[in-house]
């Protein structure tokens, strides 16, 4: 039995389909989801999400926080990843992300700035993304 996975943002459905496993970074640590997982709701960190397809290949994305919700009923397990923003690994412009990280670091050097800290975390997650 496969998982039914949906990675969505307010603007679009980033990815949807059947999968064997989902690995995500919650705010309290990493979590792995397989078929028949118990119901779960966790808050996500700014970090990669990895989805293993039924043929063994992986789909990877970076999310800017959000929530992961798991429901199981009968022979079906659904995983909804609800993020404010998400990019698939092949959509990431790593050079642009590095530039955003440098800009955020310069802002932080001028003083404590919560917006700059958040932007730095987002930019570094993309610039250092390792498939």
Image (tube, rainbow, N blue to C red):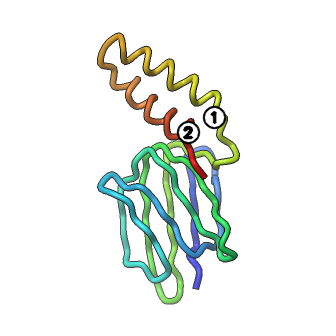
Circle 1 — which element?
helix
Quarter of the image for the N terminus: give it: bottom right
Residue of label 1 = 94
Residue at 49 percent of width and 35 percent of height: 124
Question: For the image shown, how many numbered marks are present on the structure?
Answer: 2
| Residue 80 spot, x, y in % from top left | 50, 63
Q: Earlier in the sequence, mark 1 or mark 2?
A: 1
Residue at 56 percent of width and 39 percent of height: 126
Q: Is residue 15 left or right of residue 64?
A: right
Is mark 1 in CB contact (under 8 Å) with mark 2? yes
Q: Residues within 10 Å of mark 1 (few under 14, many from 20)?
A: some
Q: Nearer the viewer, residue 128 or 7?
A: 128
Circle 2 — which element?
helix
| Residue 127 spot, x, y in % from top left | 56, 36
Q: Nearer the viewer, residue 117 or 94?
A: 94
| Residue 39 spot, x, y in % from top left | 37, 74
For residue 47, above or below residue 32 = above
Q: Nearer the viewer, residue 8 or 116?
A: 116
Residue at 36 percent of width and 69 percent of height: 40
For residue 20, above or below residue 126 = below
Q: Nearer the viewer, residue 127 or 74?
A: 127
Q: Residue furthest bottom?
A: 74
Residue at 36 percent of width and 14 percent of height: 109
Q: CA distance from mark 1 to mark 2?
A: 6 Å
For residue 102, above or below residue 49 = above
Residue of label 2 = 126
């Amino acid at each position: 039995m496969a998982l039914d996975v949906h990675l969505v943002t307010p603007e679009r459905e980033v990815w949807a389909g059947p999968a064997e496993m989902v690995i995500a970074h919650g705010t309290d640590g990493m979590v792995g989801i397989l078929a028949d997982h118990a119901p779960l709701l966790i808050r996500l960190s700014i970090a990669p999400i990895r989805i293993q397809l039924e043929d063994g290949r992986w789909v990877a994305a970076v999310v800017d926080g959000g929530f992961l919700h798991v429901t199981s009923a009968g022979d079906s397990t659904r995983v909804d990843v609800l993020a404010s923003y998400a990019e698939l690994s092949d959509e990431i412009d790593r050079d642009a992300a590095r530039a955003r990280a440098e800009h955020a670091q310069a802002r932080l050097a001028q003083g404590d700035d919560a917006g700059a800290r958040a932007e730095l975390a987002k930019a570094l997650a993309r610039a250092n993304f390792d498939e």
